[in-house]
Image: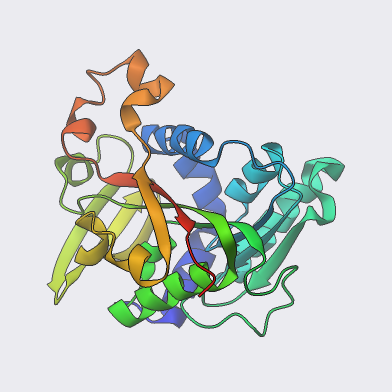
Amino acid sequence: MATVEELRGEYDEHARAYDEDYPKTPNSILETQLLTSALGDCTGYTVLDLGGGTGVRAREAIDFGAAAVDVVDISPEMLSNGRSSIADLGSRYGDRIGWHEADVAKPLDHLPLRGGPGSYDLVMANWVMDHAASIADLEGMWRNVATYLKPGGRYVGVRSGDPYAPCVVQGKYGVKYEDWKPVPGGVLFRYVVGTINIEASSWEVSYSGSTEMHEKFGLGEVEIEPCENTDVVKKDPEFWKLFLENPSMVVVKARKMTSG
């Protein structure tokens, strides 16, 4: 698996293309509609966005009513592009989004976050768990989710479904996986979107649909957001048939059940 420095370099290299290429893909359109449904009303929320990149989903959370969002990401270029984007969009987002560079698999107590442990209404982790270099790193990410959520707070995240799904083997929906390397407990691969080519990982404890990690860190009410309910799938179910037969992407939501 790529080291933290290598992963940072790959995202720095592709930071601008990421916001230009990925949103045009059918995969991104479906993801956005799934997240819109999963997030729902965020009125007054304080949000922590782990692996939030350029803040696309942070802006959406504010659009849905969130009061403030802290974005944490490993790539300074992604964060810089995010700051530039909100500057171009005027005062709507202003200082309501905080930008923080860090490895979200490690403790975040050195960051000047708006909230402390147990204070966030919502924690998002979109795709970032598909960059965990090991099960230990994956657990570190889940630990941060649990640490910063308040009791009863909500978790929403995007992860890989089946990393060998025919739809990503073919790249039908704009995202292609290649160069698979099985490792104990999971698989490493590269994902390709247009000019973007970045190493990723998927761990069986996640892509199998197991709730082991959620339960280990005190999260319950785990649900998968149904793709069949999205407008894009309803409009052309035949186009999405390959995806629906074996989804390569899953949007998961859960809730922190304890204060521990």
Instruction: State how the image is colored.
Output: rainbow
Q: Position of residue 135 (x, y in %)?
A: 29, 77
**Vertical order, 68 against 216 (above or below):** above
Q: Is residue 134 visible?
A: no
Quadrant hosting residue 188:
bottom left
Provide residue 227's location: percent of width, then percent of height: 33, 31
55 vs 182, left or right, is: right
Does residue 221 lie above or below 63 as drawn? Answer: below
The picture quadrant where one finds residue 218 is: bottom left
Q: Position of residue 42 (x, y in %)?
A: 65, 42
Residue found at x 82% / y 41%: 92
Q: Count every numbered label the image shows and give the total.
A: 0
The quarter in which the N terminus is drawn is bottom left
Percent coordinates x, y for residue 20 in the rendering: 53, 43
Name the residue: 26% across, 26% down: 240
Q: Is residue 202 left or right of residue 104?
A: left
Residue sitting at the far right = 91
Residue drawn where x is 54% and y is 70% of the image: 259
Would you say residue 28 is visible in this rendering?
yes
Left or right: where does residue 254 sit relative to residue 49?
left
Quarter-wise, where is residue 200 in the image?
A: bottom left
- Residue with the most extreme top position: 235
Work out whether residue 207 or residue 101 is closer to the camera in this orientation and state it: 207
Q: Residue at x 63, y 53 (%)?
A: 55
Residue 18 versus residue 72: which sits nearer the camera? 72
Q: Please name whichever residue, 7 or 145, is drawn nearer the observer in this view of the structure.
A: 145
